[in-house]
Image: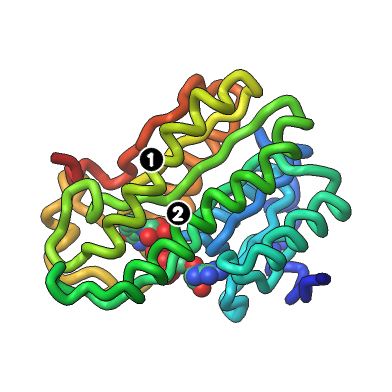
Amino acid sequence: MTLRPVHDGNLDSSPSAESEQKAGVMDGQVAIVTGGTGDIGRGVCRALTKAGATVVALDLDTSQAEGAARVLECDVTDPAACTAAVNQIVDEFGGVNTLVNLAQQFVVHTPLLEVTDNDMRVSFDSGPTATLRMMQLCYPHIKARGGGSIVNAASGGATLGMPGEGAYAAAKEAIRGLTKVAAPEWGPDNIRVNAICPVATTIPDKFPEGVANSIPLRRVGDPETDIGSVIVFLAGPGAYITGRTLQIDGGAGSWH
Ligand SMILES: NC(=O)c1ccc[n+]([C@@H]2O[C@H](COP(=O)([O-])OP(=O)(O)OC[C@H]3O[C@@H](n4cnc5c(N)ncnc54)[C@H](O)[C@@H]3O)[C@@H](O)[C@H]2O)c1
């Protein structure tokens, strides 16, 4: 199966952007970002690229791609598509150092009594099942490079147990479970696996009015400078962190 490369990304080729990229802490590294054309994904791709990585974004919807060297249309619920994508990336770019799992299909907010089997299936197929699949596919390649970093998107709505988020919360907490198990299993291979609970957007009005004022830092995070920067840090050799959940939420306190 060959995946359609949608385009070669929208990289800024101005001299300043080029020198910034060359000076990056991720020079020579290859990073895969699932959900890489989404709201947070676009910022994460930009941050990783500016840090020097060659970034490949995988997504169902490739219309809004930004900041990646390559964008592949890939449904992470499709095992053959995921296998083909990882093989193609390794063939073309020589390996994988970092995997960021952001892809997630959202189901309508529903009280628990109305959550359906289909809600659960959609949440789990695109969430933990796809996350584990991508982790398994990338594992040998990250190991072959002497180790690296995997970052999985969890959610503060799930750690808090927000009403109406049953199927989504269950899927996100399953992702944290996988993350915790991967840490001791893959730590000896120098593969660090962490989860993040982000609060970030570039989309006006995505969050209800007043959300920023409920956050100690008084603003909603930026996908590139607030979330991407932490993922770049986790990809670096100085990150002695694995199996943890980092709440990148401006202090919103999404934790019981
Ligand atoms: N934005 C936030 O503040 C926030 C808060 C908590 C958790 N999160 C988590 O962070 C991640 C990114 O969130 P976001 O706000 O950018 O969401 P988003 O909806 O903008 O991006 C998700 C991306 O995943 C893609 N996707 C969905 N199903 C897919 C599939 N089967 N195969 C391939 N791609 C698929 C979508 O097309 C989309 O581009 C998600 O996992 C989300 O649950 C975000």
Viewer-closest of 157 and 48: 157
Ligand 1, by image quadrant, is bottom left
Q: Which residue is tagged 2?
A: 128
Residue 4, above or below 244: below
Instruction: From the viewer's perspective, tell me whether residue 152 is left or right of residue 107.
Output: right
Instruction: Sort mark 1 into few (<14), some (14-19) or many (20+) by Cα contacts within 10 Å.
Output: some
Q: Quadrant of residue 127?
A: bottom left
Q: Is mark 1 within 8 Å of ligand 1?
A: no
Where does the image place residue 19, in percent across and percent down from the top left? 74, 45
Q: How many marks?
A: 2
Q: Earlier in the sequence, mark 2 or mark 1?
A: 2
The kind of residue on which mark 2 rests is Pro
How many other residues sit within 10 Å of disc 2, few (<14), some (14-19) or many (≥20)?
many
SS at badge 2: helix
Q: Is residue 103 visible?
A: yes
Task: Say which quadrant the C terminus sits in.
Answer: top left
Residue drawn where x is 74% and y is 76% of the image: 6
Frontmost residue, 216 versus 97: 97
Which residue appears at 43% of the width and 48% of the height?
A: 227
Q: Position of residue 45 (x, y in %)?
A: 59, 56
- Decide if residue 37 is in sight here: no
Q: Name the residue furthest front.
A: 117
Element on which disc 1 rests: helix
Disc 2 to disc 1: CB gap under 8 Å: yes
User: Quick check: 190 left or right of 153?
Assistant: right
In whole angstroms, how far apart are the C-alphas of marks 2 and 1? 9 Å
The residue type indicated by label 1 comes to: Gly
Res. 177 mark: 1
- Residue 11: percent from left, percent from top: 70, 63
Tell me what residue is drawn at x 18 percent, y 41 percent: 255
